[in-house]
Amino acid sequence: SQKIEQNSEALNIQEGKTATLTCNYTNYSPAYLQWYRQDPGRGPVFLLLIRENEKEKRKERLKVTFDTTLKQSLFHITASQPADSATYLCALGRRNQFYFGTGTSLTVIP
Amino acid sequence: GAVVSQHPSRVICKSGTSVKIECRSLDFQATTMFWYRQFPKQSLMLMATSNEGSKATYEQGVEKDKFLINHASLTLSTLTVTSAHPEDSSFYICSARDWTDRNEKLFFGSGTQLSVL
């Protein structure tokens, strides 16, 4: 079965720095990869999608890369702010299948 | 953007009772909805895929008789936890996909925190 792992359960960085989160997967060939943000006690909120034939996607302070050879996606938040503190989930999908990673809890320290 | 409404947000029940959770797509039709379970500080675990007008598809290890799913219309899916026990206590989240959205993203409900005493 597919396995999706995200780097360290928790990540603490200083405000203004770039946060980099990783998502590694095995036993699966996704057509696309998505990143979601989840705040405590809430459902996840969609941030970005990148398809298997794309290398990089950007949206404001967010950047996602997708390497299907390494089976890895990197998620960057530049100029991080305390409001970016949340849990970030990667999700792999193909047609009607969606599988989520373990999540990384990000804390941006003022 | 699309909105998914989930109710109730929190429920406390006695062991042995059944609990129904509703998931509605408010401004789009959802032929498929997904039900997830999430334990504290863990990721979302897909329980089942709910298809309008047909039987749900359950993931391996999820008891279909325990977690009854009904998707009677294009905007409503329900999850009933039957004869709930303390080990069923968890955060349950539904999601739906708007097929007109080429981003293929999921829209999530706000979740239901179930506590079984």
Image (cartoon, rainbow, N blue to C red):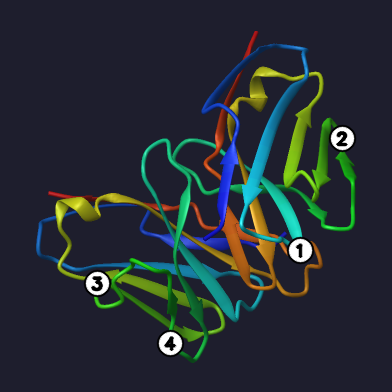
Judging from the image, mark 3 belongs to the subunit labelled B
The label shown at residue B66 is: 3
Q: Which residue is mark 2?
A: A60
Q: Earlier in the sequence, mark 4 or mark 3?
A: 4
What percent of the width, then of the height, locates residue A69? 80, 48
Spatial CA distance of label 3 from label 2 is 44 Å
Q: Which residue is mark 1?
A: A31
- Amino acid, disc 4: Lys
Q: Which residue is mark 4?
A: B55
Spatial CA distance of label 4 from label 2 is 41 Å
- Amino acid, disc 1: Ala
- Amino acid, disc 3: Lys
- Is label 4 in a helix, a strand or a loop? loop
Query: Which of the two discs, 4 and 1, sits closer to the camera?
Result: 1
Query: Which of the two discs, 4 and 2, sits closer to the camera?
Result: 4
- Evaluate if marks 4 and 1 touch, with contact meaning CB atoms under 8 Å apart: no
